[in-house]
Amino acid sequence: MSMPQDTAPDLPNEHDLPLANVRVVDLTGQSGEMGPRILADLGADVIRVEPIVVDRPSAELQEFAGLDVRHETHNANKRSVSLDLDTTAGIGILRRLLQTADIFIEGLGVDRLTDLGLEPAALRREFPTLVIVSFSDFGRTGPYRNWTATELVHVALGGVLSRSGLPGRPPLVPPGPIALESAAVTTAWAALLAYYNRLLTDSGDDVDVSVFESTVQIIDPGFGMAGSAAGGVPTSDGPRGRPDSSHLYPIFPCADGYVRLCILSPRQWQGMFEWMGRPAEFADPELGQLKHRYAAVGTLYPAIEAFLSSKSRTQAVTEGQQFGVPCGELLDFAEVLDSEHYSARDAFAAVPTPLGTLRIPNGLMEIDGTRAGIRRRAPRRGEYDTEIFSDLPPLAGPSTANSPRANPVRRRPLDGIRVLDLGVIVAGGETGRLLADMGAEVIKIENTAFRDGSRQSMSGALITPVFAWGHRNKKSIGINLRSPEGRTYIASLVEQSDVVLSNFKPGTMDKLGLSYQELSRINPRIVVADSSAFGNSGPWNARLGYGPLVRASTGLSLAWKYDNANGGFADASTIYPDHAAARVSAIGVLAQLVRRLKTNRGGTVSVAQAEVILAQHSDLFASASVRIGTESDRGTCNAPSGLYPAAGTDEWIVIDVRDSDDWERLAKCIGSIELVSDPRFETATKRLEHRAELDAVIENWTRSRSPRAAVDLLQESGVPGAMMLRLPELPEDLHLRARQTFRVARHPLIDRLLPSENTPAHFENIPDVELRPAPLLGEQTREIASTLLGLSNDDIDRMIAAGVLEEELPPIDTDNRSVTNS
């Protein structure tokens, strides 16, 4: 393919971005590129340092063109310099570059950094205000710190694989690099937290990000928020095997494909009942409750299937929306690229590259109403050498030992920030929880007329573990937002706050009189963040949306299935992308707070969950736009690679050979070194051709060993391999225990221990999260009404009696309202 004429690298859409004037040095390698890219999208000057010598042979680049696609998608908006870090001159230039930087994100590992004379502790002494972020598979500490990993290894270890698939069938590897991309979000979030702290304390930080821990926390957390369809039942309480969750978010065939329905609330069921013509056999009012509806799926779902079978996908979606039934069509990647909605939202940018013009997902969010997307194509190696090197100052002497910057202060970055949280269910509630964990005073605003779906409980409990995990460290005030007095109280709270969060259907906040224009009139410093399924504009903006519908309408559900024509869909159990989208929203909020320190003005953040999926699968969409195969849509580019049964019932390990060196190590590990010289297996191409024969040899070895024993041998040999861990096993995993990934909390209204997510990364200057219990609805109404609204006890009583304020108090026997940390 010919190189396009591309003399001007800058693309349109330049605008005022919150991280302007923040410099980031990116030395991450191929697996960690997206973290710095997120900061670049928000305006940071990200300088990618690449080796002078090409680190992959050109023949390999041509054979696996998808690797080039990754560079184009993951390095847009960056500048690039080339350095030989094995020379004194190269290290000297890097130090001069770090001297000008605010954040340094590296993926080389401590051993390599130490060899180069760049050990993090020494860099912290030399550059006390520098935020150093290390991105690695397992972190710097713990039993697995020297293990070798790939995406497949992480989805196996992180519990994702154990929930992906159907009962009685082998697990199914999810499409796309969701583990690595989730870790990239953690990288950006952790880097910004440390940088915001640095702006307030004049001290940098040393941050340790682990892909393994990010996978555990973000994709399908067993000890975190779950969708309202779960009815408050923790994900970790699911069955040992792949759960049959197809009834939660069912998929039905239509005349021209498939649609998915999300019938969760009584109101949505009533809409479905009306849409079907009020069939007498489903007139029982009890079907409005999840547990009764799930019990009736044997007769209900065949009736819905027959009802939808003659309709086109478009007709089904249109009619469903008219009746208030959340419904989405299952699209493939090509249909997504051609979608009118994504086109109207500029969700893809056309970027000239050596591979042709790629259509690349155009960023993760909108800032102040403008997309924070691609402004500059990915740089060629060393493209900015002259521009950057000529502007570097000489290396200054070391800072004095008495400098205040050399005395770090341990604090939570958002201490002193007040957040009004109108977010609901996973993506909304989780955003507020992330900010609360980092020290913000988060006030959940809610009322009984429109309860947060995450309060829904199969058992009728006042507080479920799911709600406790998602709303810890928050306060709650009950306010009727539709009453004039309630809106007055909200205005008073906005005047005294820093951030407002919501994730209602687009337009709802405006109808409540809470538009950004109105809120900023009250408080020009307010940061307002909203999230929705498909964004605030475009033909689908008014669609009722949930994560499963977002997966359907971004091509993910069709890709997440077994290889059979009829059904086989396997994404019903996953919570993805809700937790990832929540972190994207939190990143946007924090970026706006960074800018506010300099400008004293607020702004907006808008996140569409659909576009989070697009961005995290950018290689697949970019490749599809020019019909280049990638590893994900070929299945694999090497062999052996995949799942293998181990000793025991439904026990699995993964092995993921990356190249011929891995293959030789694997053959030696399993005691079959003679296979290396076997003509059938001597090249990657031949191993793929004879994959079935090779898999049989590997399977014979794995079946005779327990998962742990097999993986220990593989990792000792340097072969990427992992056992499939189930969610209940994660808190007791040796590595996660050593890394203190979980801490144990108690809630006075829950009769079980609550293993709970700790900080998103390991920080030098940010302490572990607090574990204060989640509130009942309006539990702090009196406290907040008194301290922030200035109401007397009599006023509060009168407003509660009038239904303007609400409070729900704990039962009388919970005087010991406390939480235990360990």
Image (cartoon, rainbow, N blue to C red):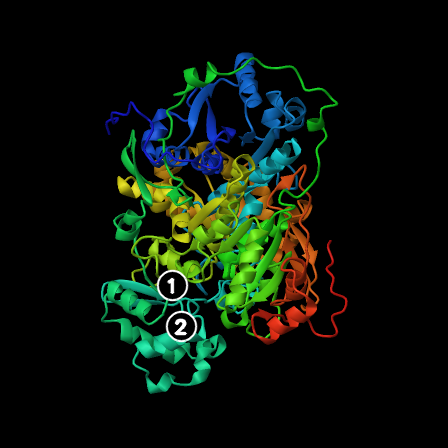
Figure quadrant of residue 380: top left
Under circle 1, the secondary element is loop
Please state the horizontal and vertical placement of residue 643, each as a whole percent of the image.
46, 50
Between 68 and 134, the one lying in front of the other is: 134
Q: Is residue 419 visible?
A: yes
Please state the horizontal and vertical placement of residue 795, each as a whole percent of the image.
65, 69
Please state the horizontal and vertical placement of residue 89, each as a whole percent of the image.
53, 12
Residue 97 as seen in the image, left or right of residue 81: right
Amino acid of disc 2: Gln
Identity of the residue drawn at 28% across and 25% down: 6
Instruction: Say which residue label 1 marks.
Output: 544
Between 413 and 468, the one lying in front of the other is: 413
Between 547 and 502, the one lying in front of the other is: 502
Identity of the residue drawn at 62% across and 34% down: 198
Tell me whether circle 2 and circle 1 mark residues in contact (CB < 8 Å). yes
| Up-down relation of residue 745 to residue 767 (above or below) | below
Amino acid of disc 1: Leu
| Up-down relation of residue 385 to residue 174 (above or below) | above
Could you give the CA–CA distance between mark 2 and mark 1, rounded to whole angstroms?
10 Å
Q: Quadrant of the N terminus?
A: top left
| Up-down relation of residue 249 to residue 68 (above or below) | below
Residue 569 as seen in the image, left or right of residue 234: left
Under circle 2, the secondary element is helix
Q: Is residue 147 visible?
A: no
Residue 359 as seen in the image, left or right of residue 503: left
Classify mark 1: residues with Cα within 10 Å, few (<14), some (14-19) or many (20+).
Answer: many
Instruction: Say which residue label 2 marks.
Output: 268
Say the numbered circle drawn on residue 106.
Answer: none
Classify mark 2: residues with Cα within 10 Å, few (<14), some (14-19) or many (20+).
Answer: some
User: Extreme bottom residue here?
Assistant: 280
Q: Earlier in the sequence, mark 2 or mark 1?
A: 2
